[in-house]
Image (tube, rainbow, N blue to C red):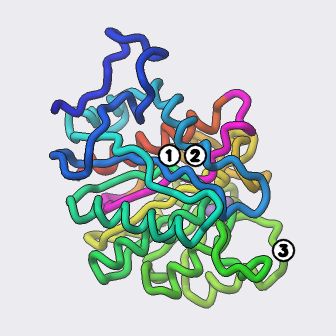
Amino acid sequence: MQFKPLEGRKYPRFSAIKTFFRLPEAKPTQNFDVALFGVPFDGGASYRVGQRFGPQGVRELSSLGRGYHWEKSINIFEKLKIADVGDAPTVPIDLKQTYARVEAFVLDLLKNKKKFIACGGDHSITLPILRAFHKKHKKPLALIHFDAHFDTYPPAWDCEYHHGTFARHAVIEGLVDPKKMVQIGIRGPFAVKEDAEFCKKQGIKVFSVDDVRQQGISKIISQLPKFGTTPTYVSFDVDCLDPAFAPGTGTPVIGGLTSYEVQMLLRALPKLNLVGADVVEIIPQYDPTQITQLLAVDVMFELLAQFARR
Ligand code: MN
Ligand code: MN
């Protein structure tokens, strides 16, 4: 199989069955480099729901995805064989069962030596993905986490697992190394003062939107940590953007990053040993102009360009 997208100049972009970037569907056992998959689940969402429709919305908009990265002078589809491996199995009314199924799905990809980008789903789906890495490699990952929120929050309604706790569990379970963890796009208000303490105690590096505004984007870029050969995961919550740029999300917070700042940050990431990534918290029904879904497509493109650099 060629693992090339359908060409827009031969087959109109509004035609054909929707896969990510109009790529072929494949099984994890087939011979390709990077798997794209959906995790249609919103059982961890605390406010708005509809993240379960994120993958199908992003697949639809990814018909507009192109392959040539002008700034990096690479064509991702020439450098990499990329395929859509479908959706991870989920159970809409059961978070624990969903976690077990997503973890098994990702473990299968890892056993088949695939890099991947997952498209959520609410942010609770990152935890089983990180657990799968730990099962396979037994070592903590470095984590680059884009978000308005720390996601290190306490249980809610006596439930340990929801979309605001994945980062805390990832640290406590030893899935990620807090000394090799960075959060970008964080801003208030918080529910209580203590919400900011976990990251401080763990020594997690935080770049708030205030930092970006006050120091300027190039200063922030110059401070981005270099994780070298450490296997690194990128988790991208679209609410790191201002809701003016990404309205289609579950818990919007005003005063966020712009689309262009996000592009600059993603393009400027130092050379990484990127092993996997996700883009989460997209809700198509709150996205009347589809701008958030288009943003998610671009984030996936920038992450694919990271894979292509290696
Ligand atoms: Mn989040
Ligand atoms: Mn968030």
The residue that mark 3 highlights is 191
Dot 1: element: helix
Q: Which of marks 2 and 3 is in front?
A: 3
Local secondary structure at mark 3: loop
- In the image, residue 11 sits, relative to residue 231, either above or below, namely above
Within 10 Å of disc 2 (Cα), the crowding (few <14, some 14-19, many 20+) is some
Label 2 sits on residue? 261
Q: In which quarter of the image is the N terminus?
A: top left
User: Label 1 belongs to which residue?
Assistant: 264
Query: In this rendering, which labeled residue sits more in front, label 1 or label 3?
Result: 3
Disc 2 marks a residue whose amino acid type is Glu
Residue drawn at 32 percent across, 9 percent down: 10
Q: What residue range appears in magenta?
A: 270-289
Is residue 283 shown in magenta? yes
Q: Give the number of callouts.
A: 3
On whether residue 64 falls in the magenta region, the answer is no
Residue 85: which disc?
none
As drawn, 276 above or below 28: below
Q: What is the crowding at mark 1: few (fewer than 14 residues within 10 Å), some, or many (at least 20)?
A: some
* Residue drawn at the location 41% of the way across and 40% of the way down: 301
Are the residues flagged by discs 2 and 3 in contact, CB closer than 8 Å? no
Q: Position of residue 185 (x, y in %)?
A: 64, 59
Residue at x 46%, y 70% (from the top left corner): 100
Looking at the image, in which quadrant does ligand 2 appear?
Answer: bottom right
Q: What residue type is labelled 1?
A: Met
